[in-house]
Amino acid sequence: MAAAGGLLTALASPTKLLLALFLVLHLVPFSSITAAAAISVGVNYGAYANNLPPPVQVAAFLKDRTFIDRVKLFDANPDMIRAFAGTGISLMITVPNGDIPSLASRSSAASPAASAWVASHVAPFYPATNISLIAVGNEVLATADRNLIAHLVPAMRSLYAALSAAGFHQIRVSTPHSLGILSTSEPPSIGRFRRGYDRAIFAPMLDFHLRTRTPFLVNPYPYFGYTARTLNYALFRPNSGVFDAATGVNYTNMFVAQLDAVHAAMRRLGYDDVEIAVGETGWPSAGEPGQLGVSVEDAICYHTNLIRLVNSGKGTPMMPGRRFETYVFALFNENLKPGPTAERHFGLFNPDFSPVYDVGLMRSQAPAPAGGSGRRWCVARADASAAALQANIDYACGSGGANCRPIQDGGACFYPNTLLSHASYAMNAYYQTAGCHDFNCDFGHTGVLAAADPSRGNCKYQ
Ligand SMILES: *[C@@H]1O[C@H](CO)[C@@H](O)[C@H](O)[C@H]1NC(C)=O
Ligand SMILES: *[C@@H]1O[C@H](CO)[C@@H](O)[C@H](O)[C@H]1NC(C)=O
């Protein structure tokens, strides 16, 4: 885009000044509404831990202190379901894998077990608790258990019939999949489901989703797919991309590529209209000493970009304009999870509710993360020269690819109309989108990282 310096000089005429003022004032109600409504994100409330607070406290905390508006449970624990009553937070609950065979029905009607499941796990709590989705099992295909797999789609149909019979027409039914359901996924256009499952399992499942307008749920984890070479690709940082010759698309992010690979597999079976939702995705904030790509900074980078992407309405190259209902893994660091250290550090919060880091999900009165590990913003140093500030704007808004519309004439951050203020906005926009490494805020020693959000009024820093 044109350098902001041009815009500054363009403001000489009083008419333009009045017009700019009019635009700013006129935009106030609109932008404050969209700013508040912009974030919608879910979390997985896992509980492999012996130090977590009681569910009622968790529900109150999420409602009062965060923007998190959806929660996914790995079971149908009545205490947890009841805790979310009256919170406005919508809930995904899970049928345990072991219950799947009994729920299945041979006919299109509900099995007695499915009706009983709804009567005991849904009816007592709904609608006080807004159960919005029921997951039938978790990553069932990955169990390779033929009995479970054969009964999965019949169980989904039967549960859906039982919900309809009970009058619960708003509750959706789905089942989460690991990306192991794909036999090929790179580049995205060759994505396809595993042979043997494609026509037998996925075609009838996608048909169910199409008819019931429910989402196909996938758990993409770039964290489990990166190498030293693809770390930046996995973390939404600048990288040379993966070129898909069939579509001419240059993918610069693994999460987006994974979603498109799933979409390509669905399209191969004729179901590209089915919505995709993300049941789990995340990035740990700590791992083994020296583990590549695992740090608070990396986790912030992944989640900031992820949340922005799924809410942006930009969609992906194959699914332009879509939003993706997304559940981050996980709400808490879970101290009893087995496996490598990173497994116990996927949480957004510690068990005492202090944020491990904040990626913009905290309402303002919440405490800052302990140890200075919270979100940071890049701002221009007050003593930087005008020439350096202008050069930073030109770079960040030009080849740096930052969105600088807000500092243009009429934008929410146009005032104060100073080089310092415009440069800070542009440098931060670059830092947040293009890298989120400390060195992305260096700008030849004219940038500095701040712990306080520089946003003011309608001017929201990313
Ligand atoms: C329940 O949750 C769904 C999905 O988030 C939402 O669309 C709906 O408005 C909620 N219903 C109520 C009564 O809050
Ligand atoms: C893909 O995009 C990246 C980043 O913009 C660029 O460096 C790379 O050259 C591109 N690759 C192709 C094949 O277009």
Image: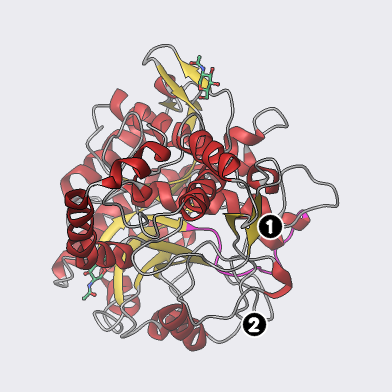
Q: In this orientation, does residue 91 appear?
A: yes
Q: Is residue 10 left or right of residue 333?
A: left
Image location (x, y in percent) of residue 106: 25, 50
Amino acid type assigned to the residue bearing label 1 in the image? Val
Relative placement, left or right, of 273 versus 257 is left
Is the stretch drawn in magenta largely helix, strand or loop?
loop
Vertical position of residue 178 compared to residue 172: above or below: above
Q: Residue furthest top?
A: 245
Residue 24, quarter of the rendered image: bottom left
Q: Residues within 10 Å of mark 1 (few under 14, many from 20)?
A: many
Q: Which residues are magenta?
A: 328-340
Location of mark 1 (residue): 296
Please state which of residues 374 and 199 is positioned toward the viewer in this rendering: 374
Q: Is residue 424 magenta?
A: no
In the image, residue 20 above or below residue 99: above
Report which residue position mark 2 lands on: 352
Q: Nearer the viewer, mark 1 or mark 2?
A: 1
State yes or no: residue 329 in magenta: yes
- Residue extending farthest to the right is 289
The structure residue drawn at horizontal position 55% and vertical position 46%, both measured from the top left corner, is: 143
